[in-house]
Image: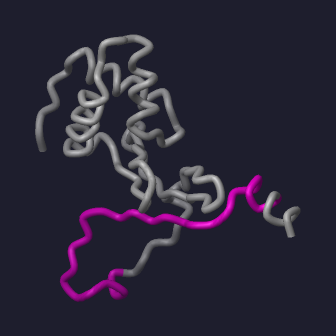
Amino acid sequence: MTMVRQTRQRQAVIEVLRASRAHPDAAWIHGQVRQSLPSVSLGTVYRTLDALVRDGVLLTIERAGQATRYDYKHGGEYHHHAVCRGCGAIFDVDAAAIPSIPAAALPAGFAVTEVRLEFMGMCTACAAKAASDN
């Protein structure tokens, strides 16, 4: 684990992420940080996000053909995601609501270091739109 130096830019990025539950991308984060630090570059935001991911403060949510989104670990909470295939919205799913997978279902001797579960589907608005289009 690296030690992230607490510069003004890094602190501003962290504050933007703490305030958001929207799983933002780097461009959105950059726009928000520029409100308090107008001279911050997009490169600085990307380097900061990379360092925070390496330190385990952020998770990345990646989709082919889309910008990487970031998920701040609020207070160490552990959750999964539901992703809308229509609009791309990402919703948090409480990990406690998901049944555990028995160790016997995993390969013998496999050591789990991280679990990421994503539910793909349609949000209420997109499902309603799809139904009305048919």
Chain part drawn in magenta: 103-128
Place residue 44 in its image quadrant: top left
Q: Is residue 1 above or below residue 47?
A: below
User: Where residue 58 appears, x then y in whole percent?
Assistant: 33, 43
Q: Nearer the viewer, residue 20 or 38?
A: 38
What quarter of the picture does the N terminus occupy?
Answer: top left
Report the quarter where the C terminus lies: bottom right
Tell me what residue is drawn at x 26 percent, y 44 percent. Answer: 53
> Where in the figure is residue 95, as x and y percent of width and height?
49, 58
Residue sitting at x 51%, y 71%: 99
Tell me, yes or no, whether the highlighted magenta stretch contains residue 109. yes
Q: Is residue 123 above or below residue 29?
A: below
In the foreground, 1 or 98: 1
Q: Residue 127 placed where, x, y %?
A: 76, 62
Q: Residue at x 34, y 87 (%)?
A: 104
Depicted 4 relative to depicted 128: above or below: above
Residue 32's spot in the image, x, y percent?
45, 22
Residue 24 located left or right of residue 40: right
The stretch drawn in magenta includes residue 91: no
Q: Nearer the viewer, residue 21 or 35?
A: 35
